[in-house]
Amino acid sequence: MTDDSTISRRHFLGAAATVAAAAPALRAPSLLRGATYRAPLAKPLDAFTYSDVAITSSIHEKQLHDTLAVLQTVSDESLLKPLRAMSGQPAPGDELGGWYLYAANYDVNNIGPGFAPACTFGQWVSAFARYYAITGDPKLQDRIVGLNRAYAKTITGDFYENNRFPAYCYDKFVCALMDSHQFAGDSDAFRILDQTTDVAMQHLPAKAVEHDHPWRKQTAAPYTWDESYTISENLFIAYQRGAGDRYKALGMQYLDDIYYDPLSEGRSNLVGRHAYSHVNSLSSAMQAYLTAGSEKHLRAATNGFDFLAAQSFATGGWGPNETLCAPDSDDLFASLSGTHRSFETPCGSYAHFKLTSYLLRTYRDSRYGDSMERVMYNTILGAKPLEGDGHTFYYADYNFAGKKFYHPDGWPCCSGTLPQVAADYRIHSYLRDSSGVYVNLYIPSSLRFTQSGAAIALTQTGNYPFESAVAFRVQATRPAEFALNFRIPAWAQGASVAVNGNRVTSAATPGTFATIRREWKDGDEVDLELPLKTRLESLDARHPDAVALLYGPLVLFPIGAGQSDVTRGQLLAATQNKRVWTSSTPTGQIRFLPYMDIADEPYSTYMQLA
C-alpha cells in the first residue's frame, strides 16, 4: 500500500511513466539465455500445515509471539470500530488511531491517520487463525469465531462505498474467513464469505483495474490505489478449500492479464509499477496455474520472478520508494543515496515468501529457496518489533547512510502482514511429495509426519547461518523407506552430507537438492555441512564497484554510514567472532553486523571499492 507522507507519489508516477515509455521491451533472463521453459513437476510439492512444525529458533519464535501478544491486547470493540462506523452502525470502544482510524472528513490529499481504516482487520484475524493452528488455544478459537460473527453484522454496501480500498479489504476478509475455516474450525466461515462476496461484488470493479487507474466516481489519487489485481489468489484458495465454484470463476475474472500477458511472453513490464502489490499479484498468477492449469500464468510468474531478481538488492529486497525499477538503469544505485525507503519489509517479505514457495513447489528448483532464505535473514527477521501503539517497522533502509526506523503512523498495512509472515516460517521450512520430505529452510525446528504407516519426527539443530553445520535426527515408530532432500544453496561450494557419520558422495551439488533415499530407522542422524565463506556481490552490472559483503546467506552490514575506499581484499579478509565481523583497513577497522543484530546504529548496505 502506498505511503507518500514525505515523498510525492505523483512525482514518482510521472518519472516512471517517462521511463516506461522510453524503455525497450526486455526479455526474461531465461529467454535471453536462449533456454526453454522447464516443464513443471507433474504434481507440485505439498506444504505441511502449521501444526506439523514446531520451531525452536528463538528469533523466529520471539517475532511471532511478541507480535501476536500486542494484537491480543487490542479489544474486539477497537478492532471492529472502523468497520461498524463505515457501515453507519454504533461503534463503541477505543480508537486504535493511525491508519486504522475511520474519519468521515479525512483529507485525501494527505496520507496519515485515517488513511486505510479497517484494512488490516482481515490480516489480523488470519494471523489469529494461523496462531491457533500452532497453539491450539481454545480461548483464541473462541475469539476468532466471535470476531467473525461480529464482523458479519457489519457487511454493508456503505462499508465499501466509504472505503478507499474496497478490493484490498475484501481480499483480506476472504483470507481471514478461509483461514478461520481451515485452521480454526469456524463452521460458519463459508456462509459469512458468501455474504461478504454478495455485498462486495456490487461495489468492486467488474475486472482487475491497475494501480493509479480511476474506476469509480471518486478520482482523487488514493481512490486509484486499490488492488483488485491481487485478489485472485485468495479467491482460488477459497475454491480449493471448498467454498464453491463461484470463487474459481471470480479468481479467473480478476486475473490482471494486462500485466500478465507481456510477462508470459518474456517481456518485462514491471517498471514504474507499485512494487509490493504487483509482486503479490504474481501469486495470483501462480494460483491460476495451480487451480486452473493455466500455463500462460505460470510463465508470467516465472518470468516475473526473474525480472524481479535482476533488480533486487543483495538482501533480496526490492522496490525502492515502493516502485519497481527500470531494467538496466541507474535506478537502484540512485536509491542508495536518494531514499531511505528501500524495501516495504513485512508486506514485501510476505509477498516474496508466497511467490518463491509457489515456484519452489512447482519446479523443485532450489534457487527459489535460496531467494526466500536471503529475504528472511536480511529483511524481515531484522524488523523492529511491533509496538503497542501500532508503530510498525515498514521500510528497510539500504541507503549509504542507513538506519532502522518506525513508520510515523500507527497500524499501517505492514502491521497486518508482519504476524502472517511470522507464522509462515513454519509452512515454508519443509515441503513433501509422495516420496518424502524437502528441507527448504535451515531453522532449528521439528517436523512430524507419517510415511508408509510410520510416525516420523525430524528434528533440526545447529547455529546456522553463523556456523556451517546443520544436524538432523530421525525418530521413527518403525523403519520406513523415504527420501530426505536437502537444499544446497548455490553459494555452498564444497557442501557435504553424512548419514550416521558416513559421508554420502556426489550428493551435495550447489544449487540443487541433495537427495538421500534409504530405509530410515529410529535414531538415524544426518549431518549437513554448508561451508560459509565471505564473498562480494555488486549492486548490478552497471555499478560493479558498489558491493555488499556476504557470508553464506547473510549480508554483512558495515556499521557507520558511508563506508568507502576499501579494497576487495580487505573486505574478503573480514574475520568472524561469533556474530560480529571485522575488516582492517589503513584508516581503521570496519565492524560488520547481520541485519538481525542491528539496533539503532547507523549502517550502510553497499560500499564503494577504492
Image (cartoon, rainbow, N blue to C red):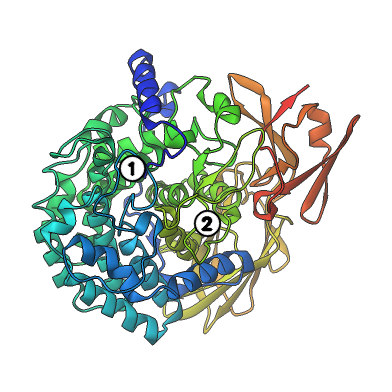
The secondary element bearing badge 1 is classed as helix
| Amino acid beneath label 1 | Leu
Residue positioned 27% across, 63% down in the render:
82
Q: Position of residue 261 (x, y in %)?
A: 24, 30
Asked whether 23 or 426 is in front, the reply is 23
Nearer the N terminus, badge 1 or badge 2? 1
Q: Which residue is mark 2?
A: 440
**Image quarter of residue 60:** bottom right
Q: Nearer the viewer, mark 1 or mark 2?
A: 1
Residue at the disc numbered 1: 282
Horizontally, residue 498 falls left or right of residue 31, namely right
Local crowd size for mark 2, using a 10 Å CA cut-off: few (<14), some (14–19), many (≥20): many
Dot 2 amino acid type = Asn
Q: Position of residue 128 (x, y in %)?
A: 38, 72
Is residue 608 rendered to the left or right of residue 447? right
Q: CA gap, disc 1 to disc 2?
A: 21 Å
Up/down of 569 relative to 388, above or below: above
Decide: is 603 above or below 68: above
Relative depth, front residue between 508 and 266: 266
- The location of residue 175, given as percent across then percent down, is 28, 61
Residue under the point 14% across and 40% down: 216
